[in-house]
């Protein structure tokens, strides 16, 4: 018994820079792939951080929920849906999985939809650069409860000591009337090493708790503060295989994990593997890791 990924959806369309549009499209595509109706989604969790025009209110999750067409009917007896933002940088998606596990285990929702993604607040660009190192993309994980021996295990989390390693803020003292179009991102010298240490700590905790994981049939999917970060982490863990998202435009930040998983599924590159180790690390420094037991192939012996 556990919680598994029923389907995924992504949006990297070039006709918009809006993260509300991208996340809404990713959500709708995940529902279409799964053959799930919007009224079957009880909860939508948005883990994205950087949003259109630095929106503060209303919650961006509500805007994405509307864009995805979820919970828009208000007649008596209609199924209830609600949404909320859960922001913890690159770690947010795994925090959302942790919350989704609790919700689905109570039986209070049939499906939980986790969406993530970021955009430059100016809505004028989609590629990362030295000043804003995050690419625009939207991604969705549609989660459901299963009675099979598959899905997510326990999410392990950790927070490091000292300075945050990476931080982002709107400098209201200097931005004047253009504050809604700008964001300051600061990465400390050596920040990637600190994130790597935090990621390795939680990843080893997840592996140690499982005990019976075979590195030869395990895939690492990790956050991408640099293109080499997942490979470096896997080397520390003694795992040979990694899967990454398309990094041509830069780091997709909160969407990195679902984008990488979606790409691996679409390319059918998880065949022969039994476990995915999801690991995320970001500002704090903070990190989270969880083992995901892949469903057995259709027709495979029990």
Image: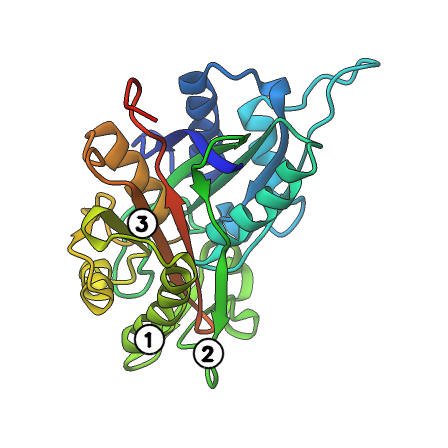
- Considering every residue shown, the one lying at the far bottom of the view is 162
**Mark 1 packing: few (<14 Cα in 10 Å), some, or many (20+)?**
some
Verify CB contact (< 8 Å) between mark 3 and mark 2: no
Q: Position of residue 31 (x, y in %)?
A: 47, 21
Q: CA distance from mark 2 to mark 1?
A: 9 Å
Query: Depth-wise, is mark 1 or mark 3 nearer the camera?
Result: 1
Label placed on residue 282: none
Q: Position of residue 205 (x, y in %)?
A: 41, 66
Residue at screen point 39% across, 29% down: 9
**Mark 2 packing: few (<14 Cα in 10 Å), some, or many (20+)?**
some
Disc with the residue nearer the chain's start (3 vs 2): 3
Q: CA distance from mark 1 to mark 3?
A: 24 Å
Q: Which residue is mark 3?
A: 135
Disc with the residue nearer the chain's start (2 vs 1): 2
Query: Depth-wise, is mark 3 or mark 2 nearer the camera?
Result: 2
Label placed on residue 197: 1
């Amino acid at each position: 018994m556990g919680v598994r990924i029923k389907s995924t959806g992504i949006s990297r369309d070039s006709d918009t820079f809006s993260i509300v549009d991208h996340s809404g499209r990713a959500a709708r595509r995940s529902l279409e792939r799964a053959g799930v109706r919007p009224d079957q989604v009880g909860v939508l969790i948005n883990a994205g951080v950087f949003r259109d025009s630095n929106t503060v209110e209303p919650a961006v999750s509500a805007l994405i929920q509307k864009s995805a067409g979820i919970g828009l009917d208000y007649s008596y007896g209609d199924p209830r849906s609600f949404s909320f933002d859960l922001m913890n940088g690159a770690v947010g998606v795994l925090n959302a999985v942790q919350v989704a596990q609790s919700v689905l285990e109570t039986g209070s929702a049939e499906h939980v939809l986790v969406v993530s993604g970021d955009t430059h607040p100016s809505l004028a660009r989609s590629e990362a650069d030295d000043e804003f190192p995050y690419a625009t993309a939207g991604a969705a994980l549609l989660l459901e409860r299963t009675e099979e021996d598959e899905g997510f295990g326990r999410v392990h989390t950790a927070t490091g000591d000292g300075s945050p390693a990476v931080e982002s803020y709107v400098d209201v003292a200097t931005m004047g009337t253009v504050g809604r179009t700008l964001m300051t991102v600061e990465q400390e010298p050596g920040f990637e090493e600190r994130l790597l240490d935090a990621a390795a700590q939680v990843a080893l905790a997840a592996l140690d708790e499982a005990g019976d994981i075979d590195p030869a049939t395990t895939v690492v999917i990790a956050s991408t503060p640099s293109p080499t970060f997942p490979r470096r982490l896997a080397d520390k863990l003694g795992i040979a295989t990694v899967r990454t998202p398309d990094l041509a435009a830069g780091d997709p930040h909160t969407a990195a994990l679902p984008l990488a998983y979606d790409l691996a599924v679409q390319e059918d590159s998880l065949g022969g593997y039994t476990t995915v180790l999801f690991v995320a690390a970001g500002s704090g420094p903070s990190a989270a890791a969880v083992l995901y037991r892949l469903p057995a192939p259709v027709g495979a012996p029990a």
